[in-house]
Image (cartoon, helix red, strand yellow):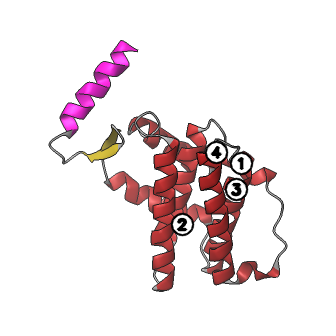
């Protein structure tokens, strides 16, 4: 999984996600992805892409904070609650940790605990549906690669957008100036 996380980080750097966005925007995206995941789960759909997209956003957020997602997970305590196999319980608990993460970002607090537990509960949700987190991350990453573009002034501009070349030129000139 570490290799795939490194690919996500490389994609985020190449797409200017880390410099062209901010933590609040990325946490908002994570919250939106989580909402889409819950909607998919309520419709009994395949939720691998949704879980994977949440993990991708978490990797980006961790990178922006100069922390490692694995360190967040290692610092979280083992979950012993027997309800971990109940999808509604897992969804509600993950939602609590997502809310805590939002608060951490707004208050400029440490995000490791909430990030670690959110990941653990997303992994538990994957297990409820007989998926692995790696499988979910692979599905989302492969779908992500289909969308070519860059982050510019807080917006993702796809390669097919007429503004794309202008944005690329501006970003290249900024890198040259740095």
In which image quadrant can residue 120 be found? Answer: bottom right
Q: What's the CA distance linking mark 2 and mark 4? A: 26 Å
Q: What's the CA distance linking mark 2 and mark 1? A: 19 Å
Asked if the stretch drawn in magenta spans residue 61, the answer is no
Could you tell me residue 53's position as x and y percent?
48, 60
> Which numbered disc, 3 or 2, marks the residue closer to the eye?
3
User: Circle 3 sits on which residue?
Assistant: 114
- For the C terminus, give its image quadrant: top left
Q: Few, some or many C-alpha atoms within 10 Å of disc 4 (few <14, some 14-19, many ≥20)?
A: few
User: Circle 1 sits on which residue?
Assistant: 112
User: Circle 2 sits on which residue?
Assistant: 51
Q: What's the CA distance linking mark 1 and mark 4? A: 14 Å
User: Circle 4 sits on which residue?
Assistant: 107
Whichever of labels 4 and 3 marks the residue nearer the N terminus, that label is: 4
| Stretch of the chain drawn in magenta | 164-178
SS label for mark 2: helix
């Amino acid at each position: 999984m570490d290799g795939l996380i490194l690919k996500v980080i490389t994609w985020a750097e190449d797409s200017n996600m880390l410099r062209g966005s901010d933590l609040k925007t990325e946490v908002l995206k994570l919250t939106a992805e989580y909402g889409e995941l819950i909607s998919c789960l309520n419709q009994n759909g395949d939720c691998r892409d949704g879980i994977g997209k949440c993990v991708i956003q978490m990797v980006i957020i961790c990178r922006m904070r100069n922390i490692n997602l694995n360190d967040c997970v290692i610092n979280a305590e083992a979950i012993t609650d027997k309800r971990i196999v109940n999808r509604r319980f897992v969804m509600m608990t993950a939602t609590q940790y997502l809310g805590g993460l939002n608060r951490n970002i707004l208050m400029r607090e440490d995000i490791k605990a909430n990030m670690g537990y959110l990941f653990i509960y997303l992994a538990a949700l994957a297990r409820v549906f007989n998926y692995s987190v790696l499988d979910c991350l692979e599905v989302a990453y492969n779908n992500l690669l289909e969308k070519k573009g860059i982050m510019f002034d807080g917006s993702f501009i796809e390669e097919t957008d007429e503004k794309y070349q202008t944005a690329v030129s501006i970003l290249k000139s900024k890198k040259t100036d740095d």
